[in-house]
Amino acid sequence: MDLVALLPPFVVAVLLISASPGPAMLLIFRQAAFRGWRAAVPTVLGLEAGLYLWALAAGAGLAALVAASEVAFVVLRLVGAVFLVYLGIKAWRTVWRGRTGPGPAPADTDAPIAPPVSRGGWWTAFGEGTVVMLANPKAAFFMIAFYPQFVPASRPLFATTALLAAVQVLVETAFYLGLAAVVGRTGAWFRRPRVRRRVDAVSGGVLVALGLRLATTTR
């Protein structure tokens, strides 16, 4: 089947995958809710950069080597788990600081305006997104299982995989930024001190749980 004919089902599959809950969705949600749409942009770009690197690795056969190597699988699994737990604890620390800070604001006061994203904050968010994607060994298995279904036998594997990955990056970026825009519109509510503490507590717990799950996962 020609590559053009395979693009519609590929895009549908990408959208379904993008909409599934996970660390990526949670990171984007937190950034958009607490800091606005602009703050979610580097997180989305970091996640997509990591995804594209995994796709190139799959096209070059490196992802298959990672998936086949027990050592590489364990190392990536542990790095990813530790980083997710770190992000979860970071969210919990925000809750703790809010409770022990000098006089929390009443829940019914106007929420603070989201602070502008500094250059350092931009790269931190970008790095967090990239690490979350690259330090997930399941991404290697996903690329190995997903992309070959959409690469015609008559086309070069690496070049076609790179092209399909570019399409996936564009689709996911548009989807995630649209989601961030929707969440960002309700950001004033999320930034209320009491609401933010609750969201941080829940999201921190989810990130820690995802990290522990990744740490104990098997092939």
Image: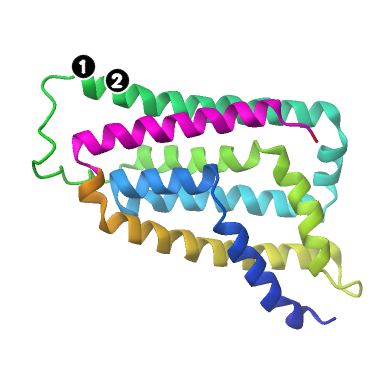
Mark 1 closeness class: few <14, some 14–19, many ≥20 residues within 10 Å:
few
Residue 96 - label: 2
SS assignment at label 2: helix
In the image, taking residue 120 as reference, residue 111 lies left or right, namely left
Identify the image quadrant of the C terminus: top right
Task: List the single residue furthest toward the right.
Answer: 153
Q: Position of residue 12 (x, y in %)?
A: 63, 71
Structural distance between the alpha carbons of marks 1 and 2: 6 Å
* Towards the viewer: 117 or 198: 198
Chief SS of the magenta region? helix
Name the residue at 40% across, 48% down. 29
Q: Secondary structure at mark 1?
A: helix
The image's colouring method is rainbow
Start and end of the magenta stretch? Answer: 191-218
Kind of residue at disc 1: Thr
Residue that numbered label 1 is attached to: 100
Whether residue 70 is visible, yes or no, is yes
User: Is residue 18 in the magenta section?
Assistant: no
